Image (tube, rainbow, N blue to C red):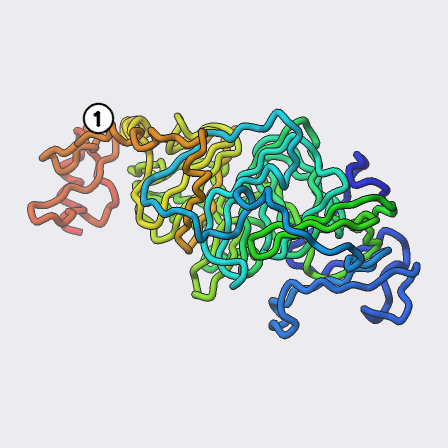
Amino acid sequence: MPGKTSCSEEPLQYLSGFGNEFCSEALPGALPVGQNNPQACPYGLYAEQVSGTAFTAPRRCNQRSWLYRIRPSVTHEPFHPLDFASEVFSGDFACALITPNQLRWRPFSVPSEAVDFVRGLFTVCGAGSPERKEGYAIHIYTASASMDNCCLGNADGDLLIVPQQGALRVTTEFGTMHVAPGEVCVVQRGLRLSVALAGGAARGYVLEVFGSHFSLPDLGPIGANGLAAARDFLTPVARFEERECDYTVLHKFNGQLFQAQQAFSPFNVVAWHGNYAPYKYDLARFCPLNAVAFDHPDPSVFTVLTCPSAIPGVATADFVVFPPRWTVAAHTFRPPYYHRNTMSEFMGLIRGAYEAKRDGFLPGGASLHMCMTPHGPDAATFERAVAIDGDAPEHLPCDTLAFMFEVSFTPRVMPAALASPHIDRAYYKCWAGLRSHFTRDPNPGAKAATGAAALPAATANGSVHDPGNVPYATAGPDENSEELATDAQER
């Protein structure tokens, strides 16, 4: 579908699948047949390759695309550094700070003046180095204006964008995506994007990874289905702008921002083919897995996308979502358990109330728990969770959607994030009400009501006595109880 403006409201089209070898053309016959770089391309276009991996990467993980454009991207004036970005949209953590404290931020304010997506990016924390192509950075964005005749190319890594307030219209060299709250999009290293606001204001989160690209996690014993399905990822079709204008190209390189001017829109790609292309995903299509007997599965079962590291089984970063779902595990403390993790956890809330902290953790806010820093439900959540009927299934609210960036490198926090007026300096107090429930009763939570289930009793030496290997014994009088007990001991 040829387009004249990047912000057109015409319906957008997409190609379905994750990591596919796609091809798309906005004009019939724009793609060369049988080769990538003919002596003369159809329509007088320029051929340009974008390589997302080394040329010699194994075929199964090699990523590249060929673009056929009206003018090549090399046609621009020299780049000059931008000073405004030194403390806001950064990849340099040399001056960042370390702290083992639990951190939480209230929702970041959307500026009243005109601020676009790039100038509204605020780096919270990160680790590693874009120069060494390892590590990540986590940002918050708040925007009140569209990027007008301006685009960003990020040479440092892939950008995973998570809108929380306000839909975005993300134009790339490959086409345009509409990304609303509840959806996410990924624009890979080096691909140019321009963000227009579909509403009056926008706020959200960005995970920038400096190393490998995002991929779908292996399912292992889960089997062939579940979590995020490959067919639900959508890549835009080719659409192009043919216009001469004074255009600003922003370029992020080794943690710094540069800008250059050129005389035409960079979104002039008439056709493209390859497997290195941006995509979006609707989180409502995520199929969560859960325990149906007792206890929690690890939160890794909620991973949507992962960015592998050089260590097998350890991700540079995982993008994890906690969607509405049934929770049915019996005799189980159902909120997220108290935890110390070798990974660090940055959490955000897109909408609703998070099950572990219904007060204080708000949509548009964030929390950060460092490597081995303890965290878990607040006092009110704990008291509520141990008092409910633990046998009755419950459904987590459909209007709630939380997520987590789980990262392996321990992050350093930017000074501006620690000094932010949005930081919650009383966060630690949410656990102050956790009182001792210690009792000499070995099973204080057992139900004594007739017909209610109870956990197996503990013997004097601490082992569990479970007659007949029955998971749960029946408490309360029963006219056949003596006979049943005799049968159980014989078995």
Nearer to the camera, 171 or 307: 171
Q: Nearer the viewer, residue 284 or 58?
A: 58
**Coordinates of residue 9 in the picture (x, y in percent):** 79, 34
**Residue 115 rendering spot, x and y as whole percentages:** 64, 33
Q: Is residue 324 visible to the viewer in this orientation of the structure? A: no
> Which residue is denoted by mark 1 in the rendering?
449
Residue farthest to the right, as pictured? 43
Residue at image point 31% right, 45% down: 373
Q: Residue furthest bottom?
A: 56
Does 70 appear above or below 457?
A: below
Residue at 60% across, 45% down: 83
| Quarter occupied by residue 459 | top left
Q: Position of residue 262 (x, y in %)?
A: 79, 50
Return the residue nearer the eye: 137 or 163: 137
Depicted 59 relative to depicted 31: above or below: below
- In the rendered structure, the answer to whether residue 227 lies left or right of residue 2 reads left
State the residue at coordinates (30%, 38%): 332
Q: Residue 450 at what x, y percent from top left?
A: 22, 27
SS class, disc 1: loop
Going 74% across and 44% down the picture, which residue do you hit? 176
- The residue type indicated by label 1 comes to Ala
Does residue 57 appear to the left or right of 28 in the view shown?
left
**Left or right of residue 75: residue 330:** left
> Who is closer to the viewer here, 458 or 126?
126
